[in-house]
């Protein structure tokens, strides 16, 4: 388990939730409050273990719910189910292919709001659902699909910049001559 990667994802999740709650210009422009946490969960599920994934889901879900109109904890289950499903099937996923990242990001960003609405309806809440919700759902899914490959690039850049790279020692030297046969 790489704790540096987990801490980096937690910091980015915190900043992402804060930016989503603070800057409303995008929401006023296109009429959609874009949630990029499901696309971040795709990266976390393909890069971390179950313990780190659980920590990221709990922290990010509680941060999101504390700054939104959702009841506290309602975002935990959709994020965790998405992350756990992807993490359990990651050996079948082409992690390095941008197309596969976009498809998984699209599906994750479409499933998260759906599961959240289902949970809200089961909690006897009354979310605002109408024809405009289809537009919001589509924009959130496309934004998540476009952002998922970006998370892979950003965290690869962070890892190469800040992470310690071990020096591979070998006993072989390029200038050494190997004599074979009888001497």
Image (tube, rainbow, N blue to C red):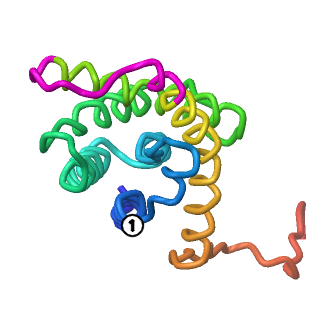
Residue 143 x/y as whole percent: 58, 41
Q: Is residue 45 visible?
A: no
Residue identified by numbered label 1: 15
Residue 19 x/y as whole percent: 42, 64
**Which residue is depicted at the point 60% across and 53% down?**
152
Q: Tell me: residue 51, above or below residue 76.
A: below
- Name the image quarter holding the C terminus: bottom right
Residue furthest out toward the bottom: 175
Q: Tell me: residue 143, above or below residue 63.
A: above
> Badge 1 local density, few (<14 within 10 Å), some, or many (20+)?
few
Q: In this picture, which residue range is highlighted in magenta?
A: 122-135
- Name the image quarter holding the N terminus: bottom left
Q: Is residue 47 visible?
A: yes
**Which residue is depicted at the point 32% across and 36% down?**
79
Q: Tell me: residue 155, above or below residue 80.
A: below
Q: Is residue 183 left or right of residue 93?
A: right
Residue 58 x/y as whole percent: 21, 48
Q: Is residue 176 magenta?
A: no
Please, what secondary structure does the residue beneath circle 1 have?
helix
Residue 127 x/y as whole percent: 25, 27
Main SS, magenta residues: loop
Work out whether residue 38 or residue 34 is closer to the camera in this orientation and state it.
34
Q: Is residue 182 left or right of residue 94?
A: right
**Which residue is depicted at the point 85% across and 77% down?**
174
**Quarter residue 125 falls in:** top left
């Amino acid at each position: 388990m790489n704790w540096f990667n987990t801490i980096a994802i937690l910091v980015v999740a915190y900043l992402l939730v804060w930016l989503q709650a603070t800057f409303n210009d995008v929401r006023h422009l296109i009429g959609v409050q874009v949630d990029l946490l499901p696309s971040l969960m795709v990266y976390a599920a393909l890069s971390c273990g179950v313990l780190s994934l659980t920590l990221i889901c709990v922290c990010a879900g509680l941060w999101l719910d504390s700054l939104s109109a959702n009841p506290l904890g309602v975002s935990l289950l959709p994020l965790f189910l998405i992350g756990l499903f992807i993490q359990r099937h990651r050996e079948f996923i082409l992690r390095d292919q941008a197309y596969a990242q976009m498809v998984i990001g699209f599906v994750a960003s479409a499933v998260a709001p759906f599961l959240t609405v289902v949970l809200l309806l089961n909690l006897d809440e009354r979310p605002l659902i109408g024809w405009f919700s289809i537009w919001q759902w589509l924009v959130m899914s496309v934004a998540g699909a476009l952002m998922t490959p970006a998370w892979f690039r950003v965290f690869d850049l962070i890892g190469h910049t800040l992470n310690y790279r071990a020096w591979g020692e070998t006993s072989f030297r390029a200038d050494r001559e190997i004599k074979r046969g009888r001497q």
